[in-house]
Image (cartoon, helix red, strand yellow):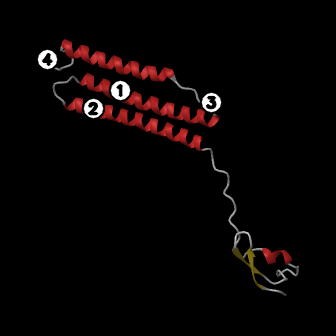
């Protein structure tokens, strides 16, 4: 059997490659002439095709949006606790803020999973209805708070501010 090391020089690029050859017998009683040109360490195979980067970006954007809404809902819950601790403010106001915070978290969780499913099916459609609902609810809450403040009904003791 023939074993050893062969060094080949490519005249175009003046590079050398070394191929380690095994004996003619591959251990199974067969001639392994083809193995003379096989490297001892196999060449790395090309990587499997990667997933679409746009798909990953879309899912990550959906997750970021969801987490931003959850933070907003948690901030509203925190504000409601602070309002409960504030002796001059009616507890009804604090509970309304807490319900609004829970509503934001519930709607955003639902929306996150709906969007995730639509992205997987490649059927995403913007949801104008829920966005308008959230904005409308926030505007109504702001106007109601302003009205309650101006009428003095925002406070426990029903006094007119300043």
Q: Residue at x 78, y 82 (%)?
A: 22
Seen from the viewer's position, the closer of residues 49 and 152 is: 49
Tag 2, which secondary structure? helix
Tag 1, which secondary structure? helix
Q: Which residue is mark 3?
A: 123
Distance between mark 1 and mark 3 Cα atoms: 32 Å
**10 Å crowding of disc 4: few (<14), some (14-19), many (20+):** few
Q: Quadrant location of the C terminus?
A: top left
Residue 51, disc: none
Which of discs 2 and 1 lies nearer the camera? The answer is 2
**10 Å crowding of disc 1: few (<14), some (14-19), many (20+):** some
Q: Is residue 33 left or right of residue 107?
A: right
Distance between mark 3 and mark 4 Cα atoms: 52 Å
Q: Which residue is mark 1?
A: 99
Q: Which residue is mark 2?
A: 79
Tag 3, which secondary structure? loop
Labels 2 and 1: the sequence-earlier one = 2
Distance between mark 2 and mark 4 Cα atoms: 21 Å
Seen from the viewer's position, the closer of residues 40 and 61 is: 40
């Amino acid at each position: 059997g023939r074993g050893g090391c062969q060094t080949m020089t490519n005249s175009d690029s003046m590079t050398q490659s070394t191929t380690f050859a095994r004996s003619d017998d591959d251990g199974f009683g067969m001639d392994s002439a083809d193995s003379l040109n096989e490297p001892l360490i196999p060449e790395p195979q090309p990587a499997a095709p990667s997933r679409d980067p746009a798909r990953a970006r879309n899912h990550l954007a959906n997750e970021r949006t969801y987490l931003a809404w959850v933070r907003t809902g948690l901030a509203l819950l925190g504000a409601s606790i602070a309002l409960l601790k504030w002796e001059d403010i009616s507890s009804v106001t604090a509970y309304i803020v807490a319900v609004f915070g829970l509503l934001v978290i519930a709607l955003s969780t639902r929306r996150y999973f709906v969007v995730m499913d639509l992205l997987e099916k490649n059927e995403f459609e913007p949801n104008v209805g829920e966005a308008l609902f959230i904005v409308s609810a926030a505007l109504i809450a702001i106007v109601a708070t302003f009205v309650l403040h101006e009428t003095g009904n925002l406070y426990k003791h029903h006094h007119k501010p300043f």
